[in-house]
Image: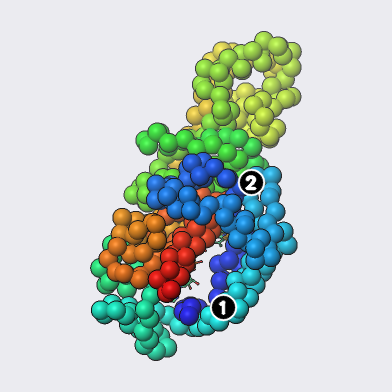
């Protein structure tokens, strides 16, 4: 029996991936796969040895759902609709005679010698095994019944968010501009993350920003989302290489105007904006631009500093950093080390991944392991 507190079953799957459900990521090497989980990667390595991305692809295929691969590695149902995934689970539940009880919130679970007594918003019931798949939440109250069972919860905090700036010229002038490969750095933490970056009307978004928000979710929380970060627009070049490239470009383009051709594969408007920031304007050719200005441009290109002032929840995917402490779960079975026949799967655990299908992969893997172990107990 499935107890669901809302009126809808699988509502997150339905809205996931912009309504397409990014089921998993084309990453068949488990070592590479775990590097996408800021929290829980060690425990998942063990779990992925039993059920990984290939397991997910096979499982869906066996259940008549073909997945398709996109250029960036994300995998979606071939139908391009999350309804395919929702229907797949609903049909299976029907076939297996599983009752889905909606509008039924679990308030408390008590363990007696051999049974669990479950208090819900509808009634009290008993079960000989419980799978706890309540997802993540930024409010500790969400986990209260697990705390009452003696489990420890690592304080939940948001992960996967975009950065806000206050009234910066870059947002006014360049909103909507994306660059394919920049890096975002937190100097204090010596963390640098690279990837596509999007300038929004409120700050920065895109995979590089979301990835940094995930890997440093706890640091951002401590700083109350106010801290300095910097962007290397010329990534992967290091400072000396940026300077060298600019001087070489000057040497080879003495008569050309600086705006003529954007450098470091960045959008033209971004290049013009950065030149403008260091007062390199388009009325003098490169030969008239002095060394000091070029060094200033190089500094801006590899170390453009910004003040983060708050965050914005990412519209397509947000997850919780924190949750049930992993050392209280046996990852061979997903069973609680405190209570026999109590299992945990998915985001309730202190596991979260970056965007791209990794969070569902955690849910599929941990659920598969728990479900298979449960079968053994029932037999
Ligand atoms: C908008 C959005 C889009 C996303 N898109 C993607 C994506 O495309 N790919 C990806 O990999 N990840 C995505 N994610 C993350 C992914 O959805 C989650 O990591 C995943 O759903 C976690 O699965 P879960 O079963 O652990 O929890 P959930 O999917 O959150 O399910 C938990 C369920 O338990 C119910 N529940 C909670 N407490 C109780 C209670 N006390 N009693 C009864 N029922 C309860 C909830 O109502 C909910 O239905 C997205 C997240 C969001 C918010």
Residue 253: image quadrant is top right
Disc 2 residue crowd, few under 14, some 14–19, many 20+, Cα 10 Å: some
Disc 1 residue crowd, few under 14, some 14–19, many 20+, Cα 10 Å: few
**Which residue is located at x 48 percent, y 78 percent?**
2
- Above or below residue 45? Residue 284 is above
Which residue bears the numbered disc 1?
96
**Which residue is located at x 50 percent, y 37 percent?**
193
Where residue 200 sits: x, y (%)? 60, 48
Residue 92: image quadrant is bottom right
Residue 129 in view in this figure: yes
Residue 73's disc is: 2
**Which residue is located at x 58 percent, y 57 percent?**
56
- Element type at mark 2: loop
- Above or below residue 284? Residue 1 is below
Q: CA distance from mark 2 to mark 1?
A: 33 Å
Residue 214's disc is: none
Which sits in the foreground, 15 or 110? Answer: 110
């Amino acid at each position: 029996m499935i107890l669901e507190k809302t009126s809808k079953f699988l509502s997150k799957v339905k809205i996931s991936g912009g309504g397409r459900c990014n089921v998993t990521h084309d990453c068949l090497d488990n070592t590479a796969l775990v590097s996408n989980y800021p929290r829980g990667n060690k425990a998942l390595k063990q779990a992925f040895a039993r059920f990984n991305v290939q397991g997910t692809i096979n499982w869906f295929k066996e259940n008549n759902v073909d997945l398709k691969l996109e250029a960036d590695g994300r995998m979606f149902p071939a139908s391009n609709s999350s309804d395919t995934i929702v229907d797949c689970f609903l049909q299976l539940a029907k076939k297996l005679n599983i009752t889905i009880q909606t509008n039924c919130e679990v308030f408390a679970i008590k363990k007696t010698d051999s049974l669990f007594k479950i208090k819900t918003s509808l009634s009290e019931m008993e079960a000989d095994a419980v799978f706890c798949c309540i997802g993540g939440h930024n409010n500790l109250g969400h986990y209260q019944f697990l705390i009452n069972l003696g489990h420890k919860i690592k304080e939940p905090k948001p992960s996967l968010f975009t950065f806000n700036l206050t009234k910066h010229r870059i947002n006014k002038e360049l909103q909507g501009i994306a660059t394919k490969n920049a890096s975002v750095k937190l100097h204090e933490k010596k963390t640098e993350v690279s990837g596509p970056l999007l300038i929004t009307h409120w700050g920065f978004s895109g995979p590089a920003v979301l990835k940094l928000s995930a890997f440093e979710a706890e640091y951002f929380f401590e700083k109350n989302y106010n801290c300095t970060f910097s962007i290397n627009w010329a990534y992967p070049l290091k400072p000396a290489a940026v300077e060298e490239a600019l001087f070489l470009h000057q040497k080879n383009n003495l008569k050309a105007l600086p705006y003529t051709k954007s450098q470091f594969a960045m959008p033209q408007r971004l290049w013009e904006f950065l030149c403008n920031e260091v007062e390199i304007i388009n009325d003098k050719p490169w030969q008239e631009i002095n060394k000091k200005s070029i060094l200033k441009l190089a500094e801006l290109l590899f170390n453009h500093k910004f003040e983060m002032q708050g965050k914005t929840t990412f519209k397509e995917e947000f997850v919780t950093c924190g949750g049930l402490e992993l050392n209280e779960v046996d990852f061979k079975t997903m069973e609680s080390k405190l209570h026999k026949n109590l299992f945990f799967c998915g985001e309730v655990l202190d596991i979260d991944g970056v965007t791209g299908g990794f969070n569902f992969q955690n849910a599929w893997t941990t659920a598969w392991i728990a479900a298979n172990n449960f079968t053994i107990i029932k037999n």
